[in-house]
Image (spheres, rainbow, N blue to C red):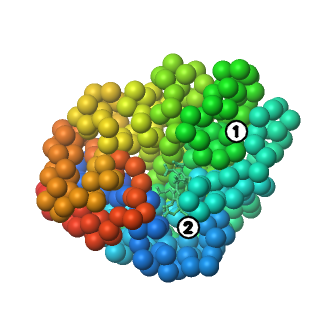
Amino acid sequence: MSANTSPAGQQNAATYDSAFMKACRREPVPHTPVWFMRQAGRSLPEYRKVREGTAMLESCMMPELVTEITLQPVRRHKVDAAIYFSDIVVPLKAIGIDLDIKPGIGPVVANPIRSRADLAQLRDLTPDDVSYVTQAIGMLTAELGSTPLIGFAGAPFTLASYLVEGGPSRNHENTKALMYGDPQLWADLLDRLAEITGAFLKVQIEAGASAVQLFDSWVGALAPADYRRSVMPASRKVFDAVAPYGVPRIHFGVGTGELLGLMGEAGADVVGVDWRVPMDEAVRRVGPGKALQGNLDPAVLFSTREAIEAKTDEVLAAASGLEGHIFNLGHGVLPTTDPEALTRLVEHVHTRTAR
Ligand SMILES: O=C(O)CCc1c2[nH]c(c1CC(=O)O)Cc1[nH]c(c(CC(=O)O)c1CCC(=O)O)Cc1[nH]c(c(CC(=O)O)c1CCC(=O)O)Cc1[nH]c(c(CCC(=O)O)c1CC(=O)O)C2
């Protein structure tokens, strides 16, 4: 921990009164805050331009480039929060796992983890392993002023799936084989990943991130009983690790309609909802005391302006009774989305919800 910070004093004072932070705390807001998962990235021509000739993982280690890319959607769309530009596999790369992000495929791991001996690949993460993150967040928070920066990490289950399968997987068969066949090794693997993930989020908060989001993108592949038994303890460990900082903790996964309550119980302050469950139903499943984030289907943005507005109004109506609502898509911005549709969407949500 640096000399001038303490866990209790971590909240970034400049962003404390922003609409996004208020919604996370379930306080009244001047308008519903909006940001988009994957708002930085391939949908933006200015992103494609600055990324030309630089590989994805290499970009994530270049603080000036990360700062520029993170700021691009804030400038263009006037979203209410920035999300740190990185990828869920960055902390794994930082501790020396041999992996790469292959264009059109995703993260690919050279030596998948399937045995107890393989666990040795997963050493602890220290702030020095990711000094470029600390550096970039320092530059970013200076530029962002009162706009909050969201830090993020992949959750233990989703990271484990990449590590065990060796890459993206539709059915997660090797992952599930390990989870059911060797529960102790599985628990130890998730616990290691929880340590690394907790340490990585701490680095981002200490550097100035106002909130964090834990992406369990693939956990919707599990039934609730398996989630509770085999995943929740590790996700809870990550949330507990950052709890002393008091920053909002967001938890999101895809196809998690049956898991929303448990994902809240794991320790999230804000539960992200994909587009399959309407917000008024999601709030029943999550229960009181949590804000919700979501949930326009990202594919709707390919439709007409009228249809986009009508579907947006449906989301806003379903969310109107919520204590805290952060508008987002039900998953990341699709790479071929028209960025102007995103800018108009931000404006529409702000106008419709202005109080
Ligand atoms: O199609 C490809 O080329 C590989 C895409 C891919 C990557 N990581 C991956 C995947 C699998 C997938 O998303 O399906 C693997 C990946 N990265 C991420 C997630 C979590 C999720 O989206 O549910 C996942 C898992 C999701 C999954 O595999 O379905 C998270 C991620 N990647 C990234 C960001 C940062 C950001 O967008 O600001 C973020 C998180 C913050 C956010 O939502 O905004 C950045 C990222 N990672 C990646 C790319 C594309 C590569 C490039 O620009 O050169 C990009 C940029 C972009 O999306 O346009 C690589």
Circle 2 or circle 1, nearest the eye: 1
Residue at (72% x, 34% y) in the render:
189
Label 1: how many residues lie within 10 Å, few (<14), some (14-19) or many (20+)? many
Closest to the observer: 197 or 72?
Answer: 72
Q: CA distance from mark 2 to mark 1?
A: 31 Å
Tell me which corner region of the image, top left, top right, bottom left or bottom right, holds residue 19.
bottom left
Mark 2, residue position:
137
- Give the quarter of the image for residue 274: top left
Measured as percent of width and height from the top left, residue 301 is found at 28, 59
- Residue at image point 47% right, 75% down: 47
Q: Farthest residue toward the right?
A: 117
Q: Residues within 10 Å of mark 2 (few under 14, many from 20)?
A: many
Position in image of residue 102 (x %, y %): 63, 60
Residue type of the residue flagged with mark 1:
Val
Q: Specify whether residue 31 is in view.
A: no
* Residue ID for mark 1: 164
Q: Look at the picture and state if 342 lies above or below 65.
A: above
